[in-house]
Amino acid sequence: MNTYLKKISTSSGFLEDCPVEFGRTLTCIIGARGTCKSTLIESIRFAFETEKERIATIVGKKDGDNQGLPTFGIIKTTLRAGSVRCELETSGTSGSRQDYTLEREIDGEPRIFINGVREHTSRDLLHGIEIFSQGDLQRIAEENNNALRLTLIDRPHKEEVQILNENRQKIAHKLSHCGLDLRKSRDRISTLGHEVAQLSSVPGQLNQLQKEAPVASPELEAEQEAHEDRRRVLESLKSVEADREELVQRIESARALGNKITESVSDIEIDGGILPVDLTSRLEELSDGIDKVMTGIEKVISMRLALLIDALEQRFEEASEMYYQLRQQEQVVNESLKKEKALIRQLEYLEGLRTKMENKRAEESRFLRERQDLRAQLRQIDDKLYALRIAEIDSINRDHRDTVQLSLSSSWKSHKYAKRLKDLLGGSRIWSQDDVARSIAEQIEPSELIDLVETGDAQRLADLLKRDLGQMTRVIAHIGDHPKLYDLEKEKPADLLSVTFFDKGEPKAVETLSKGQRATALLPIILRPLPYPLLFDQPEDDLDNSFIFKSLIDIVRELKSKRQLIFVTHNANIPVLGDAEKIVVMRMQNPTKASPALTGDVENRKKEILNLLEGGAEAFARRERYYGNLLNRSDDEMAEM
């Protein structure tokens, strides 16, 4: 599907009275200095939101040093409170056509309309244009601008490349986290391994203990029962003796009272002789009873059991000796059982640790498989990006084989990779850290380095880098625990675009060329047949007129049938010899307001071309008279002069 820019207009500002319509092939915008030609181009850039950094500059948003650029704030100044309106048309291979309108104002987002209806679902139209401002060609031609040149190579596949890079970034982020998870898993395995090692002797200890464990005696129960019987007898005897002692203490007072009663009865019998017979008989019986009681008391007092009990206890102790021996043996059994139980608990804990280790090893294997898969996905994306670039390079080489030859190489030798390595080595006290980082970046890709670090293979690292083993051991030890180690997985291989320019048939590396020759060599990267408009503000900058006439014009004449070209130019060769479909002449009615543009083909606008690009009729005629006969000579004749 091809996209064509039909018209641009603004509702306010410098271009309010100057709507401009464009041809479908080559449109050349000409005019004196300060006639809003660049404003026109940058207004279109603003509407399409091409390159957000550029948009920030042209709307006057400070971003680093951009306020020093000549285009800083150009849209804010020239558009004012108005909006930019671009009218477009897309056409398919089947001949179908669709009209679009694109509108935008300051501090607003681009709005897309299809037949007057706002489109919210897709912003693909915004990718359908390529714009080069004044000075961009010189910027591309600068040395060490490989990234910008690769961006131009990627331009035909911008959306696909953007999706691939976004996917790569997501996968690289997962890969980095996978490495961290793998490190945690391995740290846990190491910790569990130390614990398992400390308990490795437990099964042997338990087996030995069970073999040597004492067996409880079957006689112990009978001996224990006899011992308990003896103990109960002794306790009862001791209780009887204690009760007797208490009784003795109590009857001591009773004995004294009995003696007193006996003496009183005796006194009554002596003094009396006058008592009745029955009372005397009763007193005699009382006296006899008391004598009998006193005799029993004496027996109770004299009947001490303590010595007999002590002797019996001694005999019982001798009888319990067997029981004590058997019980001592039982304690040894009990201690053995306690140890056995403790060892069994340790064995169960050991089995738990081993189960955890098995789970962690399974987790480690899963992380390794996941990392291998993620690395493969990254390689596929990198290969896809490389293949897209190679296809574009081959196409450019076929179309411009006599002028320029491009080649692409891919490696890990990038400044960014070396910088990451240098940061990892920071604080390590390793000598020549910059040199070590650079050597690693030049010879070992990130995934291989991480594998070497994880395995601790300092010898392999030393062999690859041809460096001291001790130093490489310290390198691995230092970066192995670094929290940023796995960020290395995010690194991309560096694609280096080499450009060879054929200067009169002699191949020269672009780095050896002058600035103008570099610009000439890089033009084929820009001037390609793509299905969307190419806007170029002064493509002739830094190009000599000979190249413009002999090469650029031919490229433009062929390209305009395949792609809409809109050039701002001060070189008459481009509109005249390029046979522009439309000439747009920009004019100013005052310093802040453009007049309606004059438009037409080369024939209609040749007067303006002559005056603005050739210096006027008189200047042109004078040059013709000055060159005289030289104008009638061929190039070969001129070369021989």
Image (cartoon, rainbow, N blue to C red):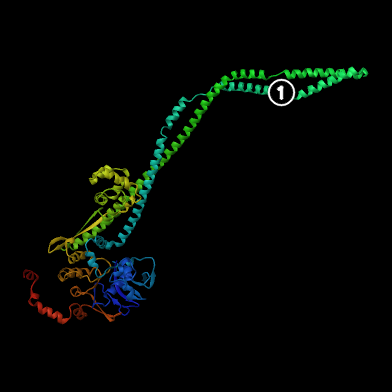
In the picture, which quadrant includes the N terminus?
bottom left
Query: Does residue 76 sit above or below 349 in this rendering?
Result: below
Q: How many marks?
A: 1
As drawn, the residue found furthest toward the front would be 271
The image quarter containing residue 88 is bottom left
Give the residue type at disc 1. Answer: Glu
Taking the image as drawn, is residue 528 in sight? no
The residue indicated by pointer 1 is 245
Residue 91, how many percent across, how many down? 30, 69
- Seen in the image, is 474 located left or right of residue 523? right
**Residue in view at x 35 percent, y 66 percent:** 123
Horizontally, residue 51 falls left or right of residue 256, namely left
Provide the secondary structure element on which disc 1 rests: helix
Quadrant (top left/top right/bottom left/bottom right) for the C terminus: bottom left
**99 or 431: nearer the viewer:** 431
Q: Residues within 10 Å of mark 1 (few under 14, many from 20)?
A: some
Q: Residue at x 76, y 18 (%)?
A: 298
Q: Is residue 291 visible?
A: yes
Q: Quadrant of residue 306?
A: top right
**Residue found at x 8% / y 78%:** 628
Q: Position of residue 606 (x, y in %)?
A: 19, 79
